[in-house]
Amino acid sequence: MKPGDAIQAGDDRGSPAAALAYLVVGPLAWAGHLLLVYAPQAALCAFRLTGTAAVETSIVRAMVIGVTVLAASAMIAAIAAPRALARLLRATAFLEGGNGRFMIAVMRLLAVLSLAGVAWAGSAALVLPPCPVLR
């Protein structure tokens, strides 16, 4: 590219940070799931048990299931459309050449493992009481 040339859409080669975010999108979604499940659940249950707010346990359970479905959907979309995710994160340059298949495989493996973790943590909402007794 010469000085003065106009930058066209898709000319951005991406940054190494974008490639790293692409690779660990599954673990990042899993971490977000854990944060969005356990922090509000603990707070809502504490408010309920102390009498600060009248929070129904069905609301807590619905919140856990909703966040689980959202995180699982994001990971399934990343697994199903890895090149679209790379475009979204501006990491398509890192998928060119011999490394592309390897990076897609690593991203998919980490996303599948993270999906198992999200499903495991989310399934607790179906089996266990949403607000256990706090100690």
Image (spheres, helix red, strand yellow):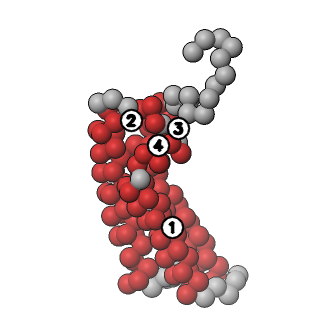
Q: Amino acid at mark 1?
A: Leu
Q: Residue at x 50, y 34 (%)?
A: 17
Separation of residues labelled 3 and 1 (CA atoms):
23 Å
Q: Residues within 10 Å of mark 4 (few under 14, many from 20)?
A: many
Residue that protrudes farthest toward the top in the picture: 3
Say what secondary structure mark 4 lies in.
helix
**In the image, is residue 117 above or below residue 7?**
below
Q: Residue at x 37, y 55 (%)?
A: 79
The answer to whether the residues at label 4 and label 2 have Cβ atoms under 8 Å apart is: yes
Q: Amino acid at mark 4?
A: Ala
Badge 1 or badge 2: first in the primary sequence: 1
Q: Amino acid at mark 3?
A: Arg
Nearer to us: label 1 or label 2? 2
From the image, tell me which residue sits under label 4: 86
* Residue nearest the observer in this picture, 120 or 38: 120
Q: Amino acid at mark 2?
A: Leu
From the image, tell me which residue sits under label 2: 95
